């Protein structure tokens, strides 16, 4: 059975989509079967994952401005889940074709229409009995998607929506991407009450009441835009120390959050964390470096950062020790995340 792992933070601008894509790619490179699920109506994961050659084959127009490709109009996250959330009487479930990124990596494409499901899901989460089937139906839909897969990596929008609530709660685990800012600290402090409320909302649904589905567990945070020094080769400056202090505060908030979530089973324990992420202390899973211009290279080449080669750097006039080290550092941190997720298959 596929492990469902969501990347969620209701604060935007934390690099959630890029992180989800790079982790999914790395898992696939390790030989695991991975399905990426684009659960954000903005379809950013789809945009960075689908290569230009494919777009040229299907449409000469701007796919993501008009969403007019025949393939993506028929095969996307909305067209798949609407059949389970708002079923039509007597209509059979239609098979959805997944976009094949590589041998081991597939994508259930995003759709602007995914937001249209918010009302039905919201009413279900509010306890409207006529829609009480939705959590069980969506869970069954996820299980069907996961057939033949090792992982489903879910990228969610930066919002406290009912759809996000449902997909987080139907996951096995979730990771909270953050960046070193005061707003990330505020977001972490808010998550305790948010998850308590979500737990209450789903507790009476059949799949949770009967323990068919266990509550998801927070694995920890991934700090994006990690800058250990204020400038290259410069340590112990005021800005570098301030940066480390913010990171320490983020980790302290996460420890408090995990302790609270453990009270109702929604976080791994410190011992479990160390068993999963052997090289890390709870609950900071990884420090993803600030990769500057590599983000533009990644987007243009339709490749994750760790797949950027020296030849590609040369094409963009970036083949220097500085950028090669950036790629290497990114790959090392991504491998730390992936190593832990591989350990989850044994749990």
Image (cartoon, rainbow, N blue to C red):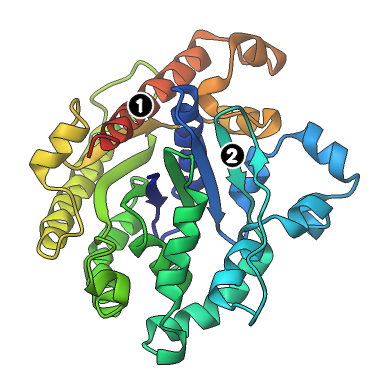
As displayed, is residue 148 above or below residue 62? above
Identify the image quadrant of the N terminus: top left
Tell me the element at label 1: helix
Q: Earlier in the sequence, mark 2 or mark 1?
A: 2
**Residues under labels 2 and 1: Cα distance?**
23 Å
Judge left or right: residue 37 versus residue 27. Answer: right
Q: Pick the residue in front: 342 or 22.
A: 342
Q: Residue at x 31, y 52 (%)?
A: 172
Q: Could you tell me residue 301's position as x and y percent?
A: 69, 28
Q: Quadrant of residue 8?
A: bottom left
Q: Pick the residue in front: 230 or 90.
A: 90
User: Is the C-beta separation of discs 2 and 1 under 8 Å?
Assistant: no
Q: Tag on residue 333?
A: 1
Q: Residues within 10 Å of mark 1 (few under 14, many from 20)?
A: some
Give the labeled residue for mark 2.
106
Q: Could you tell me residue 289's position as x and y percent?
A: 40, 30
Q: Could you tell me residue 6's position as x and y percent?
A: 40, 52
Disc tally is 2
């Amino acid at each position: 059975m596929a492990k469902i792992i969501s990347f969620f933070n209701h604060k935007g601008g934390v690099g959630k989509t890029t992180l989800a894509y790079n982790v999914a790619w790395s898992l696939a490179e390790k030989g695991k079967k991975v399905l990426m699920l684009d659960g954000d109506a903005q379809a950013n994961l789809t945009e960075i994952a689908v290569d230009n050659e494919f777009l040229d084959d299907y449409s000469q127009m701007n796919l993501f401005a008009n969403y007019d490709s025949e393939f993506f109009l028929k095969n996307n996250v909305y067209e798949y889940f609407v059949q389970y959330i708002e079923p039509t009487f007597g209509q059979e479930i239609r098979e959805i074709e997944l976009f094949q990124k590589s041998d081991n990596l597939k994508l259930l494409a995003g759709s602007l229409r995914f937001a249209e499901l918010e009302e039905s899901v919201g009413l279900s989460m509010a306890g409207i009995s006529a829609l009480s089937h939705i959590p069980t139906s969506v869970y069954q839909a996820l299980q069907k998607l996961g057939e033949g897969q090792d992982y489903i990596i879910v990228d969610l929008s930066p919002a406290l929506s009912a759809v996000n609530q449902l997909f987080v709660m139907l996951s096995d685990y979730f990771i909270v991407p953050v960046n070193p800012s005061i707003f990330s600290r505020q977001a972490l402090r808010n998550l305790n009450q948010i998850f308590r409320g979500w737990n209450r909302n789903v507790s009476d649904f059949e799949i949770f009441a009967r323990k068919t589905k266990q509550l998801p567990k927070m694995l920890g945070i991934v700090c994006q835009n990690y800058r250990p020094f204020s400038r290259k080769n410069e340590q112990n400056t005021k800005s570098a120390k301030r940066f480390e202090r913010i990171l320490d505060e983020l980790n302290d908030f996460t420890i408090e959050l995990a302790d609270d979530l453990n009270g109702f089973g929604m976080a791994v324990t410190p011992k479990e964390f160390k068993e999963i992420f052997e090289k890390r202390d709870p609950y900071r899973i990884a420090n993803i470096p600030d990769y500057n211009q590599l983000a533009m290279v990644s987007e243009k080449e339709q490749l994750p950062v760790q797949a950027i080669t020296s030849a590609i750097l040369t094409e963009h006039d970036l083949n220097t020790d500085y950028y090669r080290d950036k790629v290497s550092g990114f790959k090392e941190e991504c491998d730390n995340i992936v190593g832990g997720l591989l350990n989850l298959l044994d749990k």
